[in-house]
Image: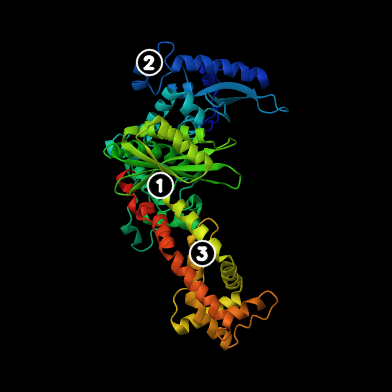
C-alpha cells in the first residue's frame, strides 16, 4: 500500500522523532518546560555559550538529519516543537510549534509561517533576541523575489505553480497564434509575481481583488501560461520578504542624507489599538515611511514612543537626524523631550499641521453661531437627495462648478472649505428659492429661510459674516492643506521602483 502524501507543515513519524522536542506536557507543566528551553536557547544563541558573530554571518540554512525532508537550522532556533493532544476529547497527538520569543502557538511546523511571524510580527524577538532577529531578516532578504531576480540567484525561487485542473485548449481560428503556450520558467513567474505585488501595494488595491474571477481572467488573458497565486500565502510571504529588502535599500539611501527629520503621529482603531507611523523626511521634503508600530493592550506613554523612536534612530544612525516632530499630545511631548535628552543635537519641533489646525480652531471659536448655520445648510443638502438634485440643476445653469462640502472634526481647514462652498453655491440656492423648487417648509428647515432668502436682512448679515470668516481663515487653511497634501505624501513621489 502506498502512503497518502502529507500536506505541507505536517510531518511524518520519522521526521517527528528527529526533531528537538519537549515532553508531551500541557498547561503549566508545558509552559514551564518551554520557559526553561527559552532560557537555555537564548543563552546559546545570543552569544553566552560560544555562539558569536561567526555563526550569525555564516550560518547554515539546511541540515540533513535522517530520513525525510531537509532540516532547517533557523526553524529549529525559532520554534519550540512538542506534541499535544488534538483536543480534550481526542487524545491523538499532533505536532505543535511555539515561538521561542513570545510563545505564540501554531499547529504544525511550517518554516514560511514561522519566518513571517518572527520577521514582521514578533516584537519580543526584535527587542530581546537581536541576533536571532537579524538572522531572520537576513533569511527573508535571501528568499525575496526581488533579491533573487537582481542577483540572478534562482535557488530560492518558488517552483512553477500548476493549475488544479488542466483545461484543454480549443484550437479554433488563429487566436492561439498570438499566445505563448509554452511552460513558464521560474524567473518569469518570479518577475510576474513581483510586478503583481508592486501593483497591489503601490496602487493601494484591496488584496481581495486577487480572488476576483474577473481579475484572474484578466491576468490569464495577459499571460496565458501564468497561474495566479493564492491570496492567503502570496501577500503574507511577499510583504515579509520585500519589506526586509526595502528597509536595506532605504537605509542605503538615507545614509547619504543629512539633517533628516523624524516625525510620528498616531490614531486608534475600532478595536482601540493605538497605531503610530514614523517617517523620515529629507531636506528636499521627501518623506519616507520607516516604521509602523501597533501598541496593543499597552499604554502609549512618552517612554514607549521614545523606545520606538530610539530604535529607528539607531537603525538609521542618529547623527543623520537634526529634528524630531510631533503633535502637542502629552505623551508625544514627553517622547520628543526624552529623544532630545538622549541626542542633544536633535531639535524638538511642533508639527506645523497640528499647530495650524489648533490655531484655526481657536479662530473658529469666535464664529460659533455662524458655523452652526453653515453646518445646518451643509447637512440639509448632504442628506436630501431632492435638494441636492435641484441645487445641481441650478449650478449647471449658472456655471457653478463647485458643490457643497462636508467638514471633518479632525481638520478645521475643512470648515473653511465648507463655508467657501456655501458662498459659491448661494446664487444657485437663491434661484431654487425664487423658483420654489426648494421651499424649506419642514420644522427642521424653516430656520434656514431667513439666511437663504436674499430679500431678508438676515441673509445679508449671514453673507457678510461668512465672507469675513473665509477671508480670515484662508491663509492658514490653504497652508494647512498644502502641508497635508504635499507631494511628499503622494505615492507618485515616493519612486518606489527605486527601492522595490
Work out whether 342 lies above or below 24: below
Q: Which residue is mark 3?
A: 415
Q: Secondary structure at mark 1?
A: helix
| Label located before the other in sequence (3 or 2) | 2
Q: Nearer the viewer, mark 3 or mark 2?
A: 3
> Mark 3–mark 1 contact, CB under 8 Å?
no
At a point 42% along the width and 49% down the height, the residue shown is: 201
- Give the residue at the far right of this rendering: 89
Residue 490 % position (x, y): 38, 54
At a point 48% along the width and 71% down the height, the residue shown is: 468
Pick the front one: 425 or 93: 425
Q: Picture quarter containing residue 444?
A: bottom right
Q: Quadrant of the C terminus?
A: top left
Q: Picture quarter containing residue 382?
A: bottom right
Q: Picture quarter containing residue 87?
A: top right
Residue 23 % position (x, y): 61, 15
Q: Which residue is mark 2?
A: 52
> Mark 3–mark 2 contact, CB under 8 Å?
no
Residue 272 visible? The answer is yes
Left or right of 138? Residue 293 is right
Q: Nearer the viewer, mark 1 or mark 2?
A: 2
At a point 44% along the width and 56% down the height, the residue shown is: 217
Q: Quadrant of the N terminus?
A: top right
Q: Which residue is mark 1?
A: 197
Pick the front one: 174 or 20: 20
Amino acid at each position: 500500500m502506498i502512503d497518502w502524501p502529507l500536506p505541507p507543515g505536517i510531518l511524518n513519524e520519522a521526521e517527528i522523532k528527529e526533531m528537538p522536542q519537549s515532553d508531551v506536557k500541557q498547561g503549566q507543566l508545558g509552559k514551564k518546560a518551554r520557559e526553561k528551553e527559552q532560557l537555555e536557547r537564548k543563552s546559546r544563541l545570543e552569544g553566552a555559550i560560544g555562539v558569536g558573530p561567526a555563526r550569525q554571518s555564516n550560518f547554515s540554512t539546511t541540515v540533513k538529519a535522517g530520513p525525510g525532508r531537509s532540516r532547517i537550522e533557523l526553524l529549529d532556533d525559532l520554534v519550540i516543537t512538542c506534541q499535544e493532544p488534538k483536543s480534550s476529547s481526542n487524545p491523538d497527538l499532533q505536532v505543535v510549534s511555539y515561538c521561542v520569543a513570545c510563545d505564540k502557538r501554531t499547529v504544525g511546523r511550517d518554516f514560511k509561517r514561522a519566518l513571517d511571524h518572527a520577521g514582521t510580527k514578533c516584537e519580543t524577538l526584535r527587542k530581546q533576541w537581536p541576533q536571532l532577529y537579524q538572522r531572520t531578516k537576513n533569511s527573508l532578504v535571501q528568499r525575496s523575489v526581488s533579491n533573487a531576480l537582481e542577483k540572478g540567484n534562482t535557488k530560492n525561487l518558488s517552483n512553477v505553480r500548476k493549475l488544479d485542473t488542466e483545461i484543454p485548449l480549443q484550437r479554433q481560428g488563429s487566436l492561439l497564434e498570438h499566445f505563448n503556450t509554452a511552460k513558464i520558467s521560474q524567473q518569469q513567474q518570479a518577475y510576474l509575481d513581483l510586478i503583481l505585488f508592486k501593483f497591489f501595494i503601490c496602487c493601494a488595491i484591496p488584496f481581495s481583488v486577487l480572488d476576483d474571477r474577473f481579475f484572474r481572467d484578466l491576468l490569464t488573458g495577459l499571460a496565458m501560461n501564468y497561474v495566479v497565486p493564492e491570496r492567503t500565502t502570496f501577500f503574507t510571504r511577499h510583504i515579509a520578504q520585500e519589506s526586509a529588502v526595502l528597509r536595506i535599500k532605504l537605509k542605503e539611501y538615507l545614509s547619504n542624507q543629512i539633517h533628516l527629520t523624524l516625525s510620528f503621529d498616531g490614531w486608534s482603531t475600532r478595536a482601540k489599538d493605538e497605531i503610530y507611523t514614523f517617517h523620515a523626511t529629507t531636506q528636499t521634503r521627501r518623506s519616507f515611511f520607516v516604521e509602523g508600530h501597533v501598541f496593543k493592550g499597552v499604554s502609549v506613554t512618552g517612554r514607549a514612543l521614545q523606545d520606538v523612536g530610539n530604535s529607528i534612530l539607531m537603525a538609521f544612525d542618529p547623527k543623520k537626524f537634526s529634528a524630531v516632530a510631533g503633535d502637542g499630545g502629552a505623551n508625544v511631548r514627553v517622547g520628543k523631550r526624552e529623544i532630545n535628552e538622549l541626542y542633544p543635537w536633535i531639535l524638538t519641533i511642533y508639527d506645523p499641521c497640528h499647530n495650524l489646525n489648533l490655531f484655526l480652531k481657536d479662530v473658529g471659536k469666535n464664529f460659533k453661531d455662524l458655523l452652526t448655520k453653515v453646518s445646518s445648510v451643509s447637512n440639509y443638502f448632504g442628506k436630501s437627495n431632492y435638494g441636492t438634485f435641484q441645487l445641481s440643476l441650478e449650478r449647471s445653469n449658472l456655471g457653478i462648478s463647485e458643490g457643497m462640502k462636508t467638514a471633518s472634526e479632525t481638520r478645521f481647514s475643512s470648515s473653511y472649505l465648507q463655508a467657501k462652498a456655501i458662498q459659491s453655491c448661494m446664487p444657485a440656492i437663491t434661484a431654487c428659492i425664487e423658483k420654489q423648487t426648494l421651499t424649506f417648509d419642514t420644522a427642521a428647515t424653516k430656520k434656514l429661510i431667513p439666511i437663504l432668502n436674499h430679500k431678508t436682512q438676515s441673509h445679508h448679515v449671514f453673507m457678510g459674516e461668512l465672507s469675513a470668516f473665509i477671508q480670515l481663515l484662508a491663509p492658514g487653511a490653504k497652508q494647512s492643506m498644502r502641508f497635508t497634501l504635499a507631494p511628499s505624501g503622494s505615492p507618485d513621489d515616493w519612486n518606489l521602483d527605486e527601492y522595490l
